[in-house]
């Protein structure tokens, strides 16, 4: 029998949650709208009605109120009509008719750009109706995928650049976006601890002792950092093609825009799914999609640590599953990391992508490969780096092989034949 001191590190597991620190003061007006989760989803999915709008344009409900008023005609509209009338191109009756038609068009355009109009367009174009767009957790995830690219001083590579070798490597790995964010606002809140085990349902969660100086309230310890981060987004078209090649039949919503419908498929697929538990065969598509994203995130962290000369515990992942996005950020907890990801992005990006694409082997193969393709040597990260307890991982999702739950994965996501989907 082994005996441990009560306060030993191996018997004490802190429980934390990690969130992006959204600048709520500047977003107060937007977050006060009833439709804000759907608007965040519309922005993230890039529906056409949001093309020239920012989320803060909806602050204080001004746009909602304007939608109900006649916007009238602009000076340019009136000048064009009067010039055509004076030149004899149109008579007075036609002038009045065109003015009324143009005014009606402007009213419709304003309504389409109102919160209610955008929500209607989102449902129509994606083919997903109902309460799913009202979910605050979905809205939070969509905001977290969108705001860093608006306010975090991002640098992106053009994945479609046919002349760039780095862009070609990213396309071969099935990436749709690759960006560096210099100010990734991470908030870590530690709210309790457990003994002997960390996983939910396997341990008792204990709050920290109440503080007498603060009226007996239970403390939650919060830390905020502005971290460098790499943001990676998978290509939804390729993910769907990969699922189909492996025997899944994705039920794509019947929206008016097929591109948006295919993006929205993953929103519906991964909503209300217990991602912090092992996903079984009865959730085959969910396990494969989340497992793909989660495993790629872990391999990316490992290769980042190797190329940057950092300990793996200096890096953490942040997954946004319904957007097929993950971030790798410096957690600043274990040594100096300033500039490490910036240097990687600017100087070694091609080498990093190549290393990820070649990370198919484990030192414990063939045993590890035959038993699910994930272990501490190839796919696991420390508890401080992984938010999902090292569950639903398998190199089979990337390279093909055997997964412990869904069985054989015939085609890995990195398979070159998927590039022609």
Image: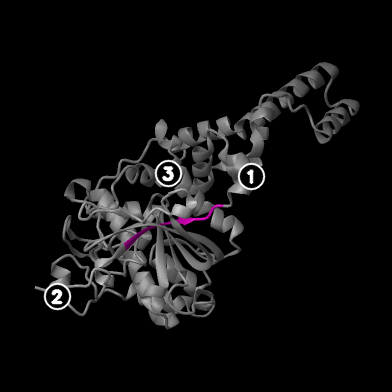
Crowdedness near tag 1: few (<14), some (14–19) or many (≥20) residues, C-alpha within 10 Å: few
Q: Is residue 17 magenta?
A: yes
Between 89 and 361, the one lying in front of the other is 361
Residue extending farthest front: 212
Q: Magenta segment, which residues?
A: 14-22
The label on residue 137 is 3
Q: Which SS type dominates the magenta stretch?
A: strand
Query: Mark 2 and mark 3: span between their CA atoms?
Result: 40 Å
The quarter of the displayed image where residue 6 is located: bottom left
Q: Nearer the viewer, mark 2 or mark 1?
A: 1
Q: Which residue is mark 2?
A: 366
Q: Quadrant of residue 137?
A: top left
Residue 358 in view (yes/no) = yes
> How far across and how far down the image is residue 402, in percent?
17, 63
- In primary-sequence order, the first of circles 3 and 1 is 1
Is residue 128 in sight in this rendering? no
Q: Using the numbered discs, state the Cα–Cα distance from disc 2 to disc 1 in whole angstroms.
A: 53 Å
Q: Is residue 411 magenta?
A: no
Q: Residue at x 22, y 55 (%)?
A: 203
Crowding near the residue tagged with mark 3, few <14, some 14–19, many ≥20 C-alpha atoms within 10 Å: some
Residue drawn at 36 percent across, 41 percent down: 268
* Residue under label 1: 56
Q: Tell me the tag on residue 272.
A: none
Describe the element under mark 2 as helix, strand or loop.
Answer: loop
Residue at 56% in and 30% down: 116
Q: What is the residue that sits farthest to the bottom in this orientation?
A: 309
Picture coordinates of residue 300 (x, y %)? 38, 70
Say whether disc 2 or disc 3 marks the residue closer to the N-terminus.
3
* Mark toward the start of the polypeptide (2 vs 1): 1
Q: Quadrant of residue 30?
A: top right
């Amino acid at each position: 029998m082994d005996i441990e001191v009560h306060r030993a590190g191996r018997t004490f597991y802190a429980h934390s949650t990690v969130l992006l620190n959204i600048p709520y003061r500047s977003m107060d007006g937007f977050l006060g709208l009833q439709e804000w989760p759907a608007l965040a989803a519309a922005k993230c999915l890039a529906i056409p009605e949001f093309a020239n709008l920012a989320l803060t344009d909806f602050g204080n409900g001004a746009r909602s109120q304007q939608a109900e008023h006649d916007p009238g005609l602009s000076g340019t509209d009136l000048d064009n009509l009067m010039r055509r009338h004076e030149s004899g191109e149109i008579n007075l009756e036609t002038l009045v008719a065109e003015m009324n038609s143009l005014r009606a068009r402007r009213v419709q355009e304003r309504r389409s750009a109102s919160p209610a109009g955008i929500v209607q367009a989102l449902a129509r174009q994606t083919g997903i109706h109902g309460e799913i767009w009202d979910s605050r957790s979905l809205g939070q995830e969509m905001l977290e995928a969108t705001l860093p690219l608006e306010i975090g001083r991002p640098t992106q590579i053009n994945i479609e650049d046919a002349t760039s070798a780095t862009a070609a490597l990213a396309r071969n790995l099935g990436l749709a976006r690759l960006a560096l964010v210099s100010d990734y606002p991470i908030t870590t809140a530690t709210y309790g601890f457990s003994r002997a085990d960390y996983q939910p349902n396997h341990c008792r969660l204990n709050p920290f002792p109440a503080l007498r100086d603060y009226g007996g309230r239970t403390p939650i310890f919060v830390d905020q950092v502005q971290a460098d981060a790499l943001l990676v987004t998978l290509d939804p078209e390729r993910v769907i093609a990969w699922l189909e090649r492996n025997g899944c039949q994705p039920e794509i919503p019947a929206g008016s825009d097929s591109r948006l419908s295919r993006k929205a498929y993953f929103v519906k697929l991964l909503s209300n799914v217990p991602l912090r538990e092992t996903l079984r065969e009865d959730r085959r598509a969910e396990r494969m999609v989340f497992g793909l994203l989660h495993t790629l995130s872990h391999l990316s962290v490992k290769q980042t640590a190797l190329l940057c000369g950092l300990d793996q515990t200096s890096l953490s992942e942040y997954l946004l599953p319904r957007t097929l996005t993950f971030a790798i950020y410096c957690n600043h907890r274990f040594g100096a990391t300033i500039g490490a990801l910036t240097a990687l992005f600017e100087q070694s990006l091609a080498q990093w992508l190549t290393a990820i694409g070649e990370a198919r082997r484990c030192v414990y193969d063939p045993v590890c490969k035959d038993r699910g393709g994930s272990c501490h040597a190839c796919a696991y990260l420390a508890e401080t780096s992984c938010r999902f307890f090292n569950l639903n991982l398998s190199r089979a999702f990337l390279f093909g092989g055997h997964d412990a739950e869904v069985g054989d994965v015939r085609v890995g996501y990195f398979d070159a034949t998927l590039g022609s989907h």
